[in-house]
């Protein structure tokens, strides 16, 4: 593993260099194929054939305030970009109001600082609900901007928390340099390629990654709504299902004449490392749900918008793998884009960006995390299995899935507005990347239904009764 770190400010090299003797540090791009290139605020030149932390395009984009404002706007991230380059030491920012600087690496918080009008002071952030909201906003902004690491300034403007600035090459204190260096070294050591050195090598091989220490475990709680078959009227799920259990209720509450109802239901099969076992759990949960409404003339609907104002999702849970920028980016590109190409564009526009934003995830009590961007995908057993197998492949081999077709504000705008053409052209390359992974050989045959539907430019019928497809012996495609 050969690593090159590109910097702009010589002080960065002086602070990071002693902690990263195995890295090559340079203020200018160096020839030779590197395994990992880290851009600390340096966007010079083109990106080599290497794994990248902070791609050149993303670094350069941070210099364009309008471009960052557009990224924040399209992702529904409140922003008032009044600050740039939060420093330490003698130089003070022009902004005198109290705000926070959140340093992030690979979605994890490295440190939080509070500007009190005179200096930055280290702020204890663990266990603070107020700082949790600040960190979450900073994490969303950094991810949307296409960065793996950096400093995000968050402050109160106009009566709400807003992003005030994003810095892909933040100034460092000695203590902060040590924290970043530890994170960089850990990231490099987890990549395939052998010991870390500061010399270029041949390109990172595209063969099979080393076997994981633990198999990725999948879980899910896909949502659906209930309607009267004859009238199409929404029926509260709480009329038939309990709050908890294999078939349960989402937390959304609808009040009718002061009486609370839960309009959205969830299927909650037991987690499993096998997509096939998880599918059987889904099947049992669906049969239980169907039995509860037997003879009532009720249909079940999946998709993106179960009813006006009530979006639904196909949340997938992952354990034995931690959420990282690379994994979320792979899920956005290789899982959500194929599903997006099958969605009803009008329903997709209504759901996003308030729900189902790119990179949306939530940590779970069991130690794993829940990926929340995808719509509800339980249209049939065959289609559900294809989605679960694809999720398993991505979570297992995301290190081999680096393509990002959602890198800029134009691409993200097309996604949120339901414009599919750009992504139809990108789909063949995305699918070829999937086919090149080691785990595709095990699950590929059961993912073909998804590929066929996308290539035929089909659109999933969100008003069909999905229950029927689960009760039929053969199910049907969708």
Image (cartoon, helix red, strand yellow):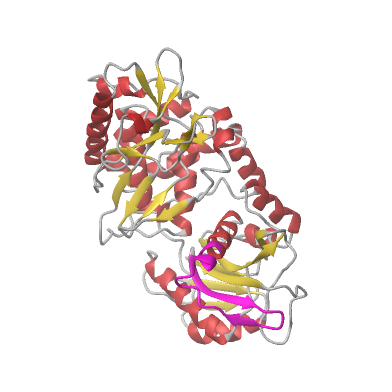
Quadrant where the C terminus lies? top left
Residue 125 falls inside the magenta stretch: yes
Question: Residue at the location (69% across, 56% down)?
Answer: 68
Image quarter of residue 473: top left
In the picture, measured across the screen, residue 227 lies left or right of residue 308, that is left
Looking at the image, residue 213 lies above or below residue 240: below
Question: Residue at the location (49% across, 75% down)?
Answer: 199
The percent position of residue 177, horizontal first and vertical second, equals: 54, 81
- Of residue 3 and residue 356, the one placed in the foreground of this image is 356
Q: Give the magenta range.
A: 108-133
Determine the residue located farthest toward the right in the rendered image. Answer: 94
Quadrant where the N terminus lies? bottom left
The percent position of residue 463, horizontal first and vertical second, equals: 45, 21
Residue 91 falls inside the magenta stretch: no
The percent position of residue 285, horizontal first and vertical second, equals: 25, 34
In the picture, measured across the screen, residue 139 lies left or right of residue 286, that is right
Question: Residue at the location (65% across, 76% down)?
Answer: 27
In the picture, measured across the screen, residue 298 lies left or right of residue 65, that is left
């Amino acid at each position: 593993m050969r690593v090159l770190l590109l910097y702009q400010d010589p002080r960065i090299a002086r602070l990071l260099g002693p902690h990263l003797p195995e890295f090559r540090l340079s203020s200018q791009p160096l020839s030779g194929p590197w395994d990992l290139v880290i851009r600390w605020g340096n966007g010079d030149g083109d990106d080599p054939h290497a794994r990248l932390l902070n791609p050149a395009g993303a670094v350069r984009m941070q210099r364009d305030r309008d471009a960052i404002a557009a990224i924040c706007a399209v992702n529904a991230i409140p922003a008032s970009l009044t600050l740039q380059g939060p420093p330490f030491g003698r130089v003070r920012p022009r902004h005198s109001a109290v705000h926070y600087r959140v340093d992030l690496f690979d979605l994890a918080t490295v440190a939080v600082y509070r500007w009190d009008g005179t200096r930055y002071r280290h702020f204890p952030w663990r266990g603070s609900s107020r700082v949790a909201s600040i960190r979450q906003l900073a994490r969303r902004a950094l991810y949307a901007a296409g960065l793996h690491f950096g400093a995000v300034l968050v402050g109160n403007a106009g009566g709400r928390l807003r992003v005030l600035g994003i810095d892909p090459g933040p100034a460092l204190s000695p203590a902060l340099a040590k924290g970043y260096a530890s994170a960089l070294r850990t990231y490099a050591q987890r990549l395939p390629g052998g010991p870390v050195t500061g010399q270029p090598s041949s390109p990172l091989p595209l063969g099979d990654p080393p076997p994981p220490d633990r198999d990725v475990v999948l879980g899910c709680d896909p949502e659906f709504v209930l309607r009267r078959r004859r009238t199409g009227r929404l029926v509260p799920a709480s009329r038939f299902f309990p709050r908890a259990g294999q078939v349960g209720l989402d937390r959304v509450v609808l009040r009718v004449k002061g009486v609370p109802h839960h309009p959205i239901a969830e299927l909650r099969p037991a987690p499993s490392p096998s997509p096939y076992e998880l599918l059987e759990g889904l099947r049992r949960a669906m049969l239980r749900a169907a039995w509860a409404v037997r003879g009532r003339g009720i249909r079940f609907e999946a998709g993106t918008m179960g009813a006006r104002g009530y979006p639904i999702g196909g949340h997938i849970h992952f354990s034995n793998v931690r959420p990282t920028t690379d994994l979320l980016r792979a899920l956005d590109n290789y899982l959500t884009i194929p599903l997006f190409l099958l969605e009803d564009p009008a329903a997709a526009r209504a759901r996003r960006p308030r729900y189902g934003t790119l990179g949306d995830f939530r940590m779970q009590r069991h130690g794993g995390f829940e990926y929340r961007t995808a719509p509800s995908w339980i249209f049939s057993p065959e289609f559900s299995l294809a989605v679960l197998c694809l999720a398993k492949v991505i979570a297992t081999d995301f290190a081999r899935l680096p393509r990002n077709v959602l890198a800029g504000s134009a691409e993200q705008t097309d996604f949120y507005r339901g414009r599919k053409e750009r992504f139809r052209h990108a789909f063949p390359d995305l699918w070829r990347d999937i086919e090149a992974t080691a785990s595709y050989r095990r699950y590929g045959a059961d993912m073909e239904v998804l590929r066929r539907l996308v290539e035929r430019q089909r659109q999933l019928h969100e008003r069909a009764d999905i229950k029927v497809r689960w009760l039929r012996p053969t199910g049907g495609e969708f």
